[in-house]
Amino acid sequence: MSDAGRDRRVERERAARKTAETLLEEKSRELFLAIRELEESRDHLDRILASMLNALIVTDVEGNIESMNTAARSLLGYEVEELEGRPLVELFPEDCVLRSEGIERLFETREARRGETTCTSRRDGTLQVQYSASVLETHDHEPRGIVCVLQDVSEQRSLERQLWRAQKLESIGQLAAGVAHEINTPIQYVGDNTRFVQQSVSDLTTLLAEYGRLVEKAKCGEALEEAIARIQQVAESVDVEFMLAELPVALEQSIEGVDRVAEIVGAMKQFSHPGSEEKTAVDLNEAVESSVTVARNEWKRVAEVTLDLAEDLPFVPALPGDLHQVILHVVVNAAHAIGEKNGDGEQGSIAVATRRSGDFAEIRIRDTGCGMSDSVKNRIFDPFFTTKPVGTGTGQGLAVSHDVIVNKHGGTIDVETVDGQGTTFIIRLPLDATVDASERPAA
């Protein structure tokens, strides 16, 4: 090869190397920019996660904790290193659905769990949280892990309890006049009968004194005509036959009045009891009877109440104070619906029944009131929604009742209604406090 050919070859190789170096430099610059962009994106994502107010926990495909954000560390009181590798479900109690079902069901169904309230463990105890959990997938739609978001609702639940207590006190205040009136009626005839018995005892004492004088004169052999005449005169003046006929009736009525007062006072005492934060075994039939008794002044002018209570109904694990309040709300609402429909006209009816339905206890409260339209029915459990005039309803009664039955007791509260004809509320409570929410009966 000539010198000129070699020079051209060398020149071509030099140009190729330069082109390759230029291309490599451009690719390196592009790669550097891509890496820097990824780092900036990751840093941006980390700042977003750190600024989240809700706690975020990410697990691997086995359900073991991999990472969590600043809010999670603050909420739980643990650092990532302390929880890393531990199963996520260990943060939740055994009756939590996420723990009882396991994460396998999440991976199997790919259905996220949203808005469920439970307790979670933290370094210094437990707190109430609302959690959501969903499957984290790869770009190939394969399960990569679990993303769990926790929101501290302890303060919210505390405010709800305060609101519930305030509504309970408000209900007691509103019912106080009616309860006083209910007590006043039997007290009046107890008082009247007591005064009748008192006067009768006084008259009989006077008559017995005359008989005593008659006996003394007979013992002394004195004439008895005057004493006998005196006895006849006193007997006629006090009307002995009337007293002997009416005294047993007066005593019987008085006993009935005292029993009625005791029933009302007992029902009010049971209703107004502050109750417990822990569930106890509750006699559902007794809860219904006492709540209906307390609300009597609300319904007695507009409706007749009938009770059909199942005798074989077992005790229900429940919060008694909250449960009484729910039943009272529904019964009072039924009375108001009948009053709105009939005005001062004919009386309607409220039928309250209890029965066992599988693993659930059921209360049905049916009224012949004005019913509801579909638009109203769909909103009755919304907070602050009410169809009552301004100043007569807060719109919180049924909203809090729904929270009590569904979230606190794991039950259901449903409504069947026909506009203009009436409404039936169906309350179902699990007989076993650990019944899974997915096993709740459908309305």
Image: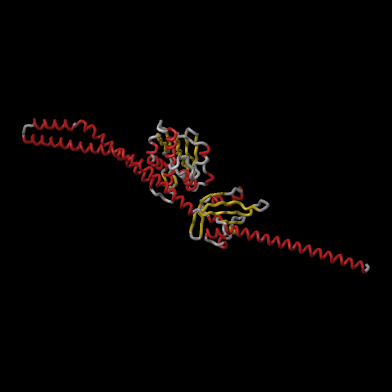
Q: Residue furthest right?
A: 2
Whether residue 383 sits left or right of residue 231 in the image: it is: right
Quarter assignment of residue 262: top left
For the N terminus, the image quarter is: bottom right
Q: Position of residue 61 (x, y in %)?
A: 62, 55
- Name the residue rendered at 49%, 55% in the picture: 127
- Name the residue rendered at 60%, 57% in the picture: 48
Residue 398 visible somewhere in the drawing: yes
Is 4 located above or below residue 135 in the figure? below
Residue 429 visible somewhere in the drawing: no
Front residue of 184 and 215: 184
Is 183 located above or below residue 30 in the figure? above
Quarter assignment of residue 337: top left
Q: Residue furthest front?
A: 390
Q: Position of residue 8 (x, y in %)?
A: 89, 66
Q: Which residue lies furthest to the bottom in this view?
A: 3
- Name the residue rendered at 63%, 59% in the picture: 44
- Name the residue rendered at 74%, 63% in the picture: 28
Q: Where is residue 351 in the image (x, y as percent from the top left)?
A: 43, 35
Q: Where is residue 149 in the image (x, y as percent from the top left)?
A: 56, 54
